[in-house]
Image (cartoon, rainbow, N blue to C red):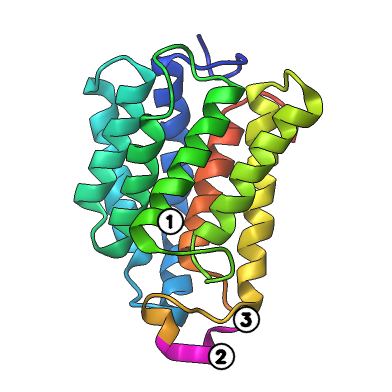
Amino acid sequence: MSPEKDAWDAEALKRALERAADLILSETETLTRADQAIGDGDHGIGMARGFNAVKAALPACEPTVPAVLETVGRTLMLKVGGSSGAIFGTLFMAGSKAVSEAPFDAEGFARFLEAGLEGVQKRGNARPGDKTLVDALAPAAAEARATLHQNGGASLGQCLHAAARAAGDGMERTRGMVATLGRAKTLGERSLGHPDPGAISMTLLLRGLAGAMNEAP
C-alpha cells in the first residue's frame, strides 16, 4: 500500500515518516534560529539528531502501525535530548497506544493526535496559550476530529491536510504569545514576535506527513 492510498499500512507509514523527517532535517537552520531567539539555540540540532536516528531505525522496526509509532517515540526520546526529546517522544509513544494494528486511516490519525496531545499535556503541563508545541498540536488534533465529523468518512489525506493547516495557524499565533513555560519564560514580553520552535517542528512534522499524500490541500 503506497502513501497515496486512503490508509497506510506499516510500510507506507514508515515512508511517510521518512518524508516528514526529511522536511524537518531540511529546516534545521530555521529551527536553530527560532530557538536562538527565545531558547537555548539547540532545538534544530536536537531535532536533526533525533530524526536522523528515526530514519535509521524505521527499516528494522516491527511491521505494525503501533510498533512503527512506538519506535519513532522511543528513538526521539533517546536521541533528541532535553525537553524536546521528552515531549516529541511522548507524542509518539502515547499516540501509538491509541491506534490498532489495522492500516492507519483517518480515524486512527485523529486518535493518534488526541492521545499524543493528552500524553504531552500530562508530561509537560502545557496548555494552549503557553507558547509551546501544544499551540500547534491542540488545534491540529481538534481539526482532524472536526474534519471527520463534518465530512463523515473523510479521507486520511483530508484529515492530514486539515491538521497541518491548523498546526501552521496555531504556530503563527505563538508569535503573539508571551512564553509561560521553559527557558523562554524568563524572557517575558521579549518572547513576543517570535514563533515557538516546538510549534514549528510540530507543524513541519504534520506538513511532511500531509505531503506524503497525493491530494491537494
Quarter of the image for the C terminus: give it: top right
| Mark 1 secondary-structure assignment | helix
Q: In terms of image quadrants, where is residue 157?
A: top right
Q: Who is closer to the viewer here, 19 or 131? A: 131
Magenta stretch, residue numbers: 186-193
Q: Residue at x 72, y 37 (%)?
A: 146
Give the mark, 3 or 1, whose residue is nearer the N terminus: 1
Q: Residue at x 42, y 18 (%)?
A: 100
| Mark 3 secondary-structure assignment | loop
Give the mark, 2 or 1, whose residue is nearer the N terminus: 1
| Mark 2 secondary-structure assignment | helix
- How many C-alpha atoms fall within 10 Å of the one at disc 3: few (<14), some, or many (≥20)? some
The residue under label 3 is which amino acid type?
A: Gly
* Residue denoted by label 3: 193
- Give the x, y percent position of residue 107: 59, 24
The chief SS type of the magenta part is helix
The residue under label 2 is which amino acid type?
A: Glu
- Give the x, y percent position of residue 53: 25, 42
Label 2 close to label 1 by CB (< 8 Å): no
* Residue denoted by label 1: 121
Q: Residue at x 33, y 47 (%)?
A: 90
The residue under label 1 is which amino acid type?
A: Gln
Number of the front mark, 2 or 3? 2
Judge from the rendering whether residue 64 lies leftward or rightward of residue 128; answer left or right: left
Q: Residue 161, can we see it?
A: no
* Residue denoted by label 2: 189
- Give the x, y percent position of residue 24: 45, 49
